Amino acid sequence: MSMIVDLRNVEKWYDEGTTRRQVLHGVDMHIVAGERVALVGKSGSGKSSLLNIISGIDYANAGDVIIGGSDINQLSEAARTQFRRKHVGFVFQFYNLVPTLTVLENVLLPLELNGIMGTTAHTRAMQMLDQVGLADRAATAPDRLSGGEQQRVAVARALVHDPLLVLADEPTGNLDSDTGEQILQLLTHLTGAAGRALLMVTHSREVAASADRVVRIQAGHLVDDATGVQL
Amino acid sequence: MMRVLWLSTLRWPLRRPWQALLAIVGVAMGVAVVIAIDIANESARRAFLLSTATVTGRATDQLTGGPNGIPEEVFRRIRVDVGLRESAPVVEGYATSVTTPTHTLQILGIDPLSEAPFRPELTPGNGLGGGVAQLLTQPDAVLMSRGTATVLGATLGQPVYVTIAGARQAMVLVGLLETNDAATQRALDDLLITDISVAQRWLGKVGQLDRIDLIIPTDARGAAVRTQLATILPPGVRMTTPTQRAQSTTEMTASFEINLNALSLLALVVGMFLIYNTMTFAVVQRRPLLGTLRCLGVSQGEIARLMLVEGSVIAVLGTALGIGLGIGLAQLLLGLVARTINDIYFVVTVNTITLTFWPLFKGVVLGLLASLVALAIPTWEAARTPPRTVLRRSSYEEQTRRLVPVLGWLGLASMLFGGVVMWQIPFILASYVGLLALTLGAAMVTPVATVAVMALVRPLAVRLFGLIAGMAVRDVVTSLSRTAVAVAALMIAVAVTIAVGLMVASFRLTVVDWLTTTIRADVFVSAPAITANRLDTPLPAGVYDKVSALPGIDRVRRYRSTMLPTDTTPVMQIALDVTEADHAAFLWAEGDPAQIWPAFNRDAIIISEPLALRHRLHVGDTFTMRTDRGDVAMPIVGVFYDYGTELGVVMQPIERYQQFFDDPHLSSLGVYLPADADSEAMVATIRDQFPTTALLVRSNRTLRESSVAILDRTFAITNVLQLLATIVAFVGIFAALTAMQLERVREFGMLRAIGLDPRQLWQLVLSETGLMGLVAGLVALPVGTAMAWALIFVINRISFGWTLQFAFEPHIYLNALVTAIVAALLAGIVPAWRIARVAPALALREE
């Protein structure tokens, strides 16, 4: 199995006036292809900071952040943007679909960003929508969909360009338990099937239980690493 | 860039069409005002040049004389002694329509026998055919265009009446001027062609010519002709080219045009704020979306391009609409521009606008450029949107608040820079740069002022109006990234209103004071003139003697006012009687009154402040006057304050004037009465003395009133521009506040859900917008005063050379404050109404 996420001694702090607030302390973390990992911890424990660093939307102050073989912490802002575009898929708690685009166009967007256009893109986007059960809503505007449907579109958008890594931030946090369960199944099934790595930030025991491995973070330290079942 | 990415942005305005529409309207109005002023100015200038070119014809050179023109004898010598057959005498003047006194017609007196080489279109029928022969044979015969005939109601062979120098004059239409060229045909409108002898009689210029047109070849024969001409021309007669003459006339209006353009640019600046405002809101509203796009891998450059394209679409649509609106507005403003030119500078008859490339091109460039400048900061803001939620709204506002003191200092520095530039660099362009720096600096200081005012207001607001008022105060500060821009835009618009209001008031105060000091005679007698601020139409012969002989008169003061050509623009020459009693009528900018009058009576002249500034002249220098005896350098002994014309005035005793100019005419008389005399009765007495003569006889009070009326008339266009700038600003503040409040519909839904009733929501929204209006109004007071200072003491002085008093008018400040608050409250009504009507459940729904 190839290593997708390889964090070595990652440190993150914020300077606030004369004081320094350390949010991550020497974090080491590894995720291999096809692995589904849940990152759990209390509010303010450093989950989001870690997710931001892994996704390349924030820098680590120290340490190596090697994703898919590249140390993205050494990349420029433009290069990290290109990296995200190609290798990362996002699923957010509040879906964050583009309200001005239809369902199909939302799914087409990552393909176009990666230079995949025309019939190829259309076919692949429709296949993805079919997989999340929304092919018949392709021309619908996002605000016409229920929360669960919007999250399914978000899943399709996160996976359509075949990223190495899918990052999901509280993917079921805004959904009822049944719908959340469906989304979880969809997410784990589709990422697992394609051999992608999945990192989910969550407070939910159900979400954590569905992961292959659960990583607990506390006050910026990784304190526990166990299988979902053990948890 | 990718199609879908484009769609994500380009569809955004469709979701908020009113917001996009208001931005388009804002840009359109800014562009419209700028090009309307340009088109109106250009149309007036072109109309003047075209009519000049038409009446000049193919002349290569022109001979012009002093105030009394050229003796007819000169023409005879050119023909006989020099043998130049291609020469044509001309007498010019103006008439007005009897039915529409504001409609001015140009009289062109020509010699039909000399005309053929010069103006073939004015002499139809090969010079002597058609109506031209009748010009020579039929008394009071005229030729005019079909359009003019229609306006005057003239039919062939029938008499028609016009007013010349206040008197009714009959003329007979004997032929129509027609040409196939549309531009020339337009120039022929409002032109009355008559025989030179008839024109001389009508205009009181018997024996005189206004000019002699010449066609001098460029070869050796031409050089010989020029040499010969130089030997026969009397000293006061000069040779110029038609282009030089026209140019020096149109240059008279340069300051007027610059100032109109500057005021019109203010509308564009306010329009710039509008597009800046709109795009800033577009960025703020879309921050989460932009963050998501950045997460998905959209680069900063792509985000910047998206915003630029969206803004450019607004700019292009706004500019295109502005061009259309501007053309319509130009037609409306043309009348005001032409009236001001006629009142102050020279006679121009123009009724329709002329569309040329440059004003439209300038409108397009300025509209797009202004929009791009206004787009720069929001675009940069959008591009640096961090991916997703690294920066939340609250931390963004926190960052904005941290920027406030920095902006404040930068603003102060910008204002200081503006002040220093205006104070130290006496050039008009530098003044406008300084004024712009002052304005932008004030806009940057506005956030500090907003925070400070809110801190002061909050305890009082809570005590008087309760928690909701307190919430409103807090909201203004916590949403500073949005409120500050809207407050700054409104502040600038209100400051402009204060500045222009104070400038007009200062001008009025200064001129009224000046009129009180200088207009001392009890009754004034003059000939009616076309140009309101000039008295260069001579009084009919005998008026002075007859008025002087009337019983009940202390003394009669003589004035002769003429325009003197110089190397640049003409200046006004006033020759007058000055006795010791008249000394107090002068206020001195330079010179010692004890020395001025003896020198003035000996050989010196006094000049007006604008002339001194324009030509950089001081006491002790000399001014070279082109007289009928040749150029005479006269020493300057004093510089007096004068607000009659920015072209400048040269004053000398009337006896000396008559020594240097062959001009026995007078322009007006000032009649002084004993202390207890009834001036209105004297006005009636004088009028009775001249029952058949066109004379303007006015009392001191009437003359002052009519002078102030002319002054107010010249500011009519300023007031229109000020109003337009205010409308643009109102559209801006309306758009900003509506966008800002509607964006918070979810927050208001929450407040409704926890128990606020619609009335309380109204109160909250209107308190917030009202408070923003209050801050804008309060900041506008000192800013408007500083801008007024710049306009009055720097820009006016450089443009026109006038020293003005500063009129502190409390009502202008009060009006501005009330305007700011009312505009903000009005702008809050629509969002308050919409928000109060939204069901809480709907408002709480996630978009």
Image (cartoon, coloured by chain):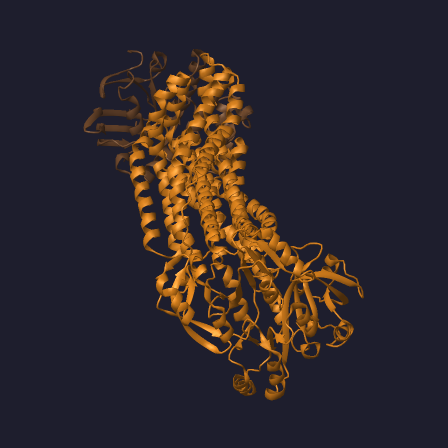
At 45% from the left edge and 65% from the top edge, which residue is drawn? B650
Q: Is residue A23 left or right of residue B702?
A: left
Depicted B181 relative to depicted A196: above or below: below
State the image coordinates of residue B743 (x, y, percent, origin top left): 46, 26
Work out whether residue A16 or residue B733 is closer to the camera in this orientation and state it: B733
Q: Is residue A116 above or below residue B716?
A: above
Chain coloured orange here: B
Could you tell me how many numbered marks the image carries? 0
Residue at image location 50% in from the left, 63% down from the top: B251
Q: Return the residue nearer the eye: B549 or B589.
A: B549
**Quarter where residue B302 is shown:** top left
Residue shown at the point (60%, 88%) measured from the top left: B81
Q: Horizontally, is B167 left or right of B431 in the view?
A: right
Asked whether the viewer can see residue B493, the reply is yes
Q: Which chain is brown?
A: A
The vertical placement of B775 against A217, above or below, is below
Q: Position of residue B77 (x, y in %)?
A: 60, 85
Give residue B516's position: percent from left, percent from top. Answer: 48, 51
